[in-house]
Image (cartoon, rainbow, N blue to C red):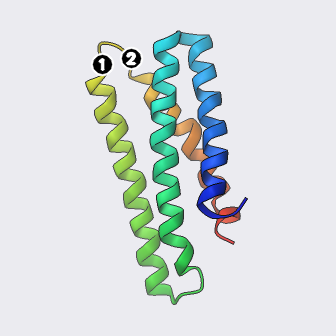
Amino acid sequence: MRGVRGVVWLGAALAAVAAGAGALLGGAFAALGGVVGGAVAVAAQAWAVALLRPAMGAKTPEFVRRWGLGMVVRSVGAGLVIVLAVVLRGRVPALWPAAGYLVVLLPLLFTETRFLR
């Protein structure tokens, strides 16, 4: 698994886990929330890896700039999940998009170095 493709495959599997947990614990709308949060996390992490990967051999200022941009992308993703939770407030409990985002993003962050080689 290399690069963005690996992030997407692993993220899709984790989003499926989040959706399954949501379906078991909270029903169909909770599964939808888990998928939405997971999809946002996959997109944010794939974009962050795509930004950072070309700078892996660069000088420190360029590396840090791209790393910072990746952190901004992840933060925007978290903000988007919050907005979606507010917009879907009557249909999907706010816990599930947030849980889907975290369940997908955290393992992707811990395995990020594998995708940057």
Question: Can you give x and y, in whole percent of width and height, for residue 37 in the image?
Answer: 46, 34
Q: Residue at the spot x=41%, y=77% of the render?
A: 65
Residue furthest bottom in the image: 59
**Looking at the rendering, which quadrant does residue 33 occupy?**
top left
Name the kind of residue labelled 2 in the image. Answer: Val
Mark 1: which secondary structure? loop
Q: Is residue 90 above or below residue 98?
A: above
Q: Is residue 114 above or below residue 25?
A: below
Label 1 – label 2 distance at C-alpha: 6 Å
Q: Is residue 28 above or below residue 35?
A: above
Name the kind of residue labelled 1 in the image. Answer: Arg
Q: Quadrant of the N terminus?
A: bottom right
**Looking at the rendering, which quadrant does residue 109 occupy?**
bottom right
Question: Can you give x and y, in whole percent of width and height, for residue 110 in the image?
Answer: 65, 54
Tell me if label 1 and label 2 are in contact, CB under 8 Å.
yes
Question: Can you give x and y, in whole percent of width and height, for residue 90 in the image?
Answer: 29, 13
Q: Which residue is mark 2?
A: 92
Q: Residues within 10 Å of mark 1 (few under 14, many from 20)?
A: few
Q: Which residue is mark 1?
A: 89
Question: Can you give x and y, in whole percent of width and height, for residue 41 in the image?
Answer: 49, 44
